[in-house]
Amino acid sequence: MRKYIIMSDTCSDLSKKVREQYDLEYVPMRYIYDDNDVEASLDWEPLSAKEFYDVMRKGTRIRTAAVNTQTFLEHFEKYLKEGYDVLYIACSKALSTSINSANAAKDELLPKYPEAKIICVDSINSTGCLTLLCIKASKLRAEGKTIEETAAWVEENKKFFNQEAVVDKLAYLKQAGRVSASSAFFGDLLSIKPVIISDIHGYNYAVEKVKGRKRSIARIIEKTIAEYVPNDLGIAIHHADCLDEALAVKETLKEALGLTDDQFEVDYIGPTVGASVGPGTLSIFFYGTEVTADSLADSKK
């Protein structure tokens, strides 16, 4: 069996610790603010996480760019030359065009490396769910699963990875085109905090509206407890510079679900997703009951 690399992109929010522990790679996206066009590094360079979110708090808009085909060509070919196959687990196609560029790179490279395999999977997820999917893929690889078997597991099980998130201000989602201007204005005015999940297509979907920060956080904890299914991955809690709240959520879930500290992964929401959701966003990610919400179908009702 040929060895294979497992990689994702910046939307995976794979911390350096996780990447090193599970031998994972990522392909960087980019972000633009003022006159700066920089790599969206998950090691927080050149801006630290605190600096990044403070830039947003001061009113500067940060735009993001998906991975282009040339970048994928460089990253894929690096490993093909070393005799590895490549499994790329992508951010939801509903949120990023990166997987299209990855498939274009694959089509260009495979004739040059006919013995190689490149498999690109649309995870229909992002941030912490994508982190957990990559960790599971690494565990399957360590068990001796082939690249095809691992990709098939991800494809079959991705619908069981749940996101429960709240944002602090709807203005950032408005800038990113995720909600209308009127919804953002009245939502912030009335202190409405939508509960945002990732639906069956990979779209971020506001399934509930809760008034007040504390109530909204309590609600995503409640939903997590109801939907969590015991597994070997635990829970990822990612935050946009609100660590104290993230740690408090961890302690509540640890007690409620009978988990231990090492079953939690608490980290920042990375620059690509963070640019859309804004500082103060708090998200819980876990393997649980099947996701069935369909924003496209609901919009037609």
Image (spheres, rainbow, N blue to C red):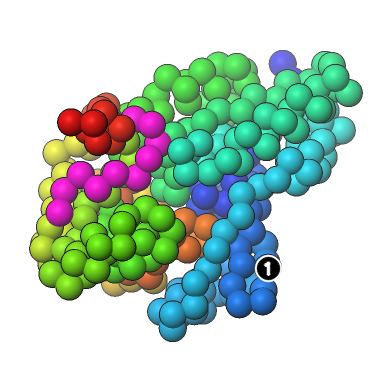
| Foreground pick, 263 / 191 | 191
The image shows residue 196, relative to residue 227, as above or below, that is below
Residue 208 falls within the magenta-colored stretch: yes
Using the rendered image of the protein, determine whether residue 133 is visible from the camera's viewpoint.
no
- Residue 144 at x, y = what percent? 59, 20
Q: Main secondary structure of the magenta part?
A: strand
The image shows residue 297, relative to residue 276, as above or below, that is above
Give the image quarter of residue 159.
top left
**Magenta-highlighted residues:** 200-209
- Residue 263 at x, y = what percent? 34, 47
Q: Which residue is drawn at 85% across and 19% down?
A: 111
| Foreground pick, 172 / 181 | 181
Q: In which quarter of the image is the C terminus?
A: top left
Query: How many labels were placed on the picture?
Result: 1
Instruction: Name the residue beneath numbered marker 1.
Output: 37
Q: Is residue 263 left or right of residue 88?
A: left
Q: Which residue is drawn at 39% across and 24% down?
A: 157
Q: Is residue 205 left or right of residue 107?
A: left
Residue 202 falls within the magenta-colored stretch: yes
- Residue 147 at x, y = what percent? 62, 21
Q: Residue at x 70, y 45 (%)?
A: 68
Give the image quarter of residue 161.
top left
Crowding at dot 1, Cα within 10 Å, few <14 / some 14-19 / many 20+, comes out as some
